[in-house]
Image (cartoon, coloured by chain):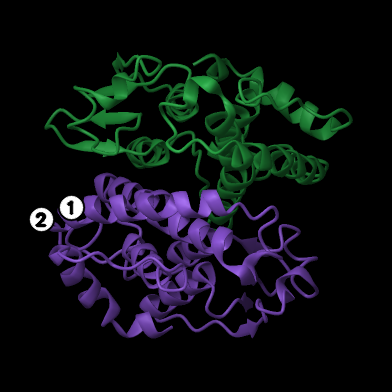
Chain colours: A green, B purple
Amino acid sequence: MRLFDGGRAPNPRRTRIFLAEKGIDVPLEPVDMAGLGHREEPVASRNPLKRLPVLELDDGTILTESIAICRYFEALHPEPPLFGQSPLEIARVEMWNRRLELGLFNAVASAFRHTHPAMAEWEVPQIAAWGEANRPKALAFLEFFDEHLATSRFAAGDTFSVADITGLVAVDFMKPAKIAMPDGLSHLGRWYEEVAARPSAKA
Amino acid sequence: MRLFDGGRAPNPRRTRIFLAEKGIDVPLEPVDMAGLGHREEPVASRNPLKRLPVLELDDGTILTESIAICRYFEALHPEPPLFGQSPLEIARVEMWNRRLELGLFNAVASAFRHTHPAMAEWEVPQIAAWGEANRPKALAFLEFFDEHLATSRFAAGDTFSVADITGLVAVDFMKPAKIAMPDGLSHLGRWYEEVAARPSAKA
């Protein structure tokens, strides 16, 4: 088994943090995304969508999409559960993971990809107005998330989950996307401090 | 329990098709999305993100995000499984559901929301160039999906899954988004005929 990894890019990082939380060691195959290595072999034939991460099993089976790879390991190694256990927990983790993806992760990524000069070759056509439109969307979501965290220790309740991983990676990606953290979001600050201090955050 | 429903909008339809496949009867509360009813009560206080569907349980618990609601019912009523059963099936369903969401569903929705005059009040700012940029993205994904379907009966393998629901709803939403189905995608046509003929597709 090996995981084709994309270094600092946010989706590969989600999978690495997830594996670190699970304590699962998967050999990494680093791909130089800055040099567009994900558009060439050995990635392109394994994932025609030319995105990372890509997991290759020993029999050659390919799995792509960071959260799909996470679910594979969750099913093989249920402890600690990072996608919830009861029907309501499972639904809440999915709800908050998706809210954080749609409202924050994707907004931050769109701001980055559509306004950063280095992304002109990645995002074709690069549409600056769309990138700019995503900054206030991300900020509005952060206010909503801050209010939620006033009464919730983690994104989906009392237990750390994959939704926190999505949130952490999205917040950390605000810096390259040139979105400044607004002042006064104290619950968000408390949450960020806790999740960023976990050893997995360095993965 | 009641499900606040958004009629023809694609995400509410995903949840209705899922419930029909499961044979689960949930009372619907129709919301007039064309009249922006999802921005008012009774939706706005239940989902501050002002999106549908919204599931309200008997104790007042709220679940949002179409796929999170689907996972809740999958956990309560595992048969027939629509998110896979083995670790590899679970990962493949998630992979194809996400590929179809990112590559097709979101592209078609962006084309619709950013170019349709009726959406100017929904999507602020409406950026026509971004809407237009999504049409070729959707078409490129359809070619990729067609190739996949040459050797796969359904999106994620031999068994109908939530990924097929996402694909069906996305393809049907191409019409209002003014994206014409390209000629010559015979595997896609064969797949569409089969999934659209299921009784659930009328939900």
Q: Secondary structure at mark 2?
A: loop
Q: Which residue is mark 2?
A: B151
Question: Which is more toward the observer, A51 or B109?
Answer: B109
Label 1 lies in what chain? B
Q: Position of residue A38 (x, y in %)?
A: 30, 24
Q: Quadrant of residue B159?
A: bottom left
Q: Answer whether residue B171 is visible to the viewer in this image.
A: yes
Q: Specify the amino acid type for callout 2.
A: Thr
Q: Residue at x 35, y 29 (%)?
A: A52
Q: Position of residue B102 (x, y in %)?
A: 42, 49
Q: Is residue A148 left or right of residue B52?
A: right
Q: Position of residue A76 (x, y in %)?
A: 32, 38
Q: Position of residue B11 (x, y in %)?
A: 52, 67
Q: Secondary structure at mark 1?
A: helix
Label 2 – label 1 distance at C-alpha: 6 Å
Q: Residues within 10 Å of mark 2 (few under 14, many from 20)?
A: few
Q: Which residue is mark 1?
A: B148
